[in-house]
Image (cartoon, grey):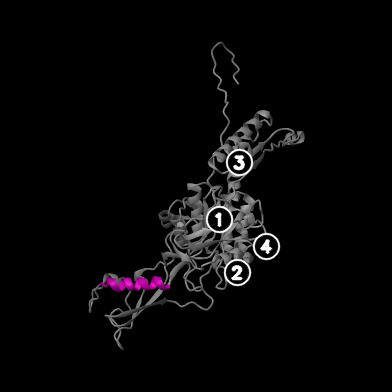
Amino acid sequence: MINPKSPGVYIDEISTLPASIAPVATAIPAFVGYTKADTYQGETLTDKPTRITSLLEYQLIFGGPYDEKFEITLTGTVAVTTVEVNLAVPPAPDDPALSPYTMYYNLQLYFANGGGPCYIVSVGTYSDAVPFALAVGRLTAGLATVEKEDEVTLLVVPEAVSLAAADRLTVNDAMLAQCAKLQDRFAIIDAVVLGGTVAADGAGLRADVGADNLKYGAAYYPSLLTSQSYYFEDENLVIADDRGGDGLGPLDGKTLDIVLNGEDGAPVITPDKALYNNIVKALRLKFGLTLYPSSAIAGIYARVDRERGVWKAPANTGVRMVDAPAVLVTTEQQDGLNIDATSGKSINVIRRFTGKGNIVWGARTLAGNDNEWKFIPVRRLFIFVEESVKKATEFVVFEPNDANTWIRCKTMVENFLTQLWRNGALAGAKPEDAFFVKVGLGTTMTAVDILEGKLNIEIGMAAVRPAEFIILRFSHKLQES
């Protein structure tokens, strides 16, 4: 308002347009786990969420995968060679045969399936000790640091599958508790393949998750046989060459690097690329890389959100960089995973269909018996709208709590929801059938509320729900002419 004190012409610009709501990002995961490096340019990154946008950036900051140690044995003759590959250091009973440090491979799977920007929380570096040590306390501590990052919308702890059952429960419950506390993120949980029946694996997952905050997470099953390979250094793989009867072959004690590049000496070892390829093939056939699906699912969330919207179920979608699910689940077996009357904890299955490939075949949250929050896209749509409106209405704090402010808020929210309705996020033939926004004295507030400084806005949305069961009814029609 202008208060002129001398003659002249004055201009007063009046704001008549309502503020707009900018949509927040919907698929920004935080990955918590072990990395090769935890310092970058002199800065310690342990328990510090670090934003990256590509696998190359991850390698630059956190390094590559764990260097697996294998032992190669050649038998037969130089002309006809049989290749056998084993672990260089056989594990003790009940210890993992290969390292549980899979963060790098999971990031590969995430970006291959459409993932974009994400956060990495390193909880420590790789250890060469056997058995490999994954500390549940380190994972939960790293998970706690993600609370400070407002941009994060998804939580993924891919290495939790290598923990003991009680520790998996601790990590999973910590993820769900954080999502419920902040109300702006969603947890993706892996159902562990225990080696028994599908029903037993389902029961295992339901034991790995507590009874609280189930609407803020989803579980996926089974693990996936990927097209990736374990990383190894050619110069670290020593060959035991048993060719030639009682005598040792020329490559005994040499490394795989020498097979590929040759070595000067007496006798001269020339490169043998055919043998090298056979060794690598044998290694990858015996030690194929199996990963759990949480990182791939996070990438699919990002891809579906980008191409369709957060209201589209991230299902009936192909999983990239995967040869097949580790367990082929039938329709009858999935019945017990998708719906469980006792616990209500639904488990989404990745299945292989002839002619279609590997498909995500489920879109339920862990709250499978809750009609309000049964479906993933409904839960994530509400998170998206709640966070977008929350951030956009912060300007109202300390504004006069009167009708002018109420109208500005109502108009702003209505414009935002109308755009969502036009995009197909809300059900209804007309905007008034799709949502409502209420604010005002006698509607959402009392005189006491206003005296206490409260401005209440009530928003209702008719979210679209996925067509989970397509039922076709056929009958015979009698001849009429």
Give the mark nearer the N terminus: 2 vs 3.
Answer: 2
Query: Alpha-carbon neighbours of circle 4 within 10 Å: few (<14), some, or many (≥20)?
Result: few
The kind of residue on which mark 2 rests is Ala
Magenta segment, prevailing SS (helix, strand or loop): helix
Q: Is residue 159 above or below residue 465?
A: below
The kind of residue on which mark 3 rests is Gly
Residue at x 62% of width, y 40% of height: 434
On the image, numbered disc 2 is attached to which residue? 199
Location of residue 481 in the rendering, given as x and y in whole percent from the top left corner: 55, 50
Give the mark nearer the N terminus: 2 vs 4.
Answer: 2
In three-dimensional space, the C-alpha distance between marks 2 and 4, rounded to whole angstroms, equals: 14 Å
Tell me the tag on residue 428: 3
On the image, numbered disc 4 is attached to which residue? 341
Q: Is residue 292 above or below residue 252?
A: above
Magenta extent: 271-286
The kind of residue on which mark 1 rests is Leu
Helix, strand or loop at label 4? It is loop
In three-dimensional space, the C-alpha distance between marks 1 and 4, rounded to whole angstroms, equals: 27 Å
Q: Nearer the viewer, residue 299 or 15?
A: 299
In three-dimensional space, the C-alpha distance between marks 2 and 3, rounded to whole angstroms, equals: 39 Å
Q: Is residue 159 above or below residue 309?
A: below
Pointers 1 and 4 in contact (C-beta within 8 Å): no
Give the mark nearer the N terminus: 1 vs 4.
Answer: 1
**Furthest-bottom residue in this view:** 246
Which numbered mark, 1 or 4, is in the foreground of this view?
Answer: 4
Helix, strand or loop at label 2? It is helix
On the image, numbered disc 1 is attached to which residue? 155
Q: Nearer the viewer, residue 266 or 301?
A: 301
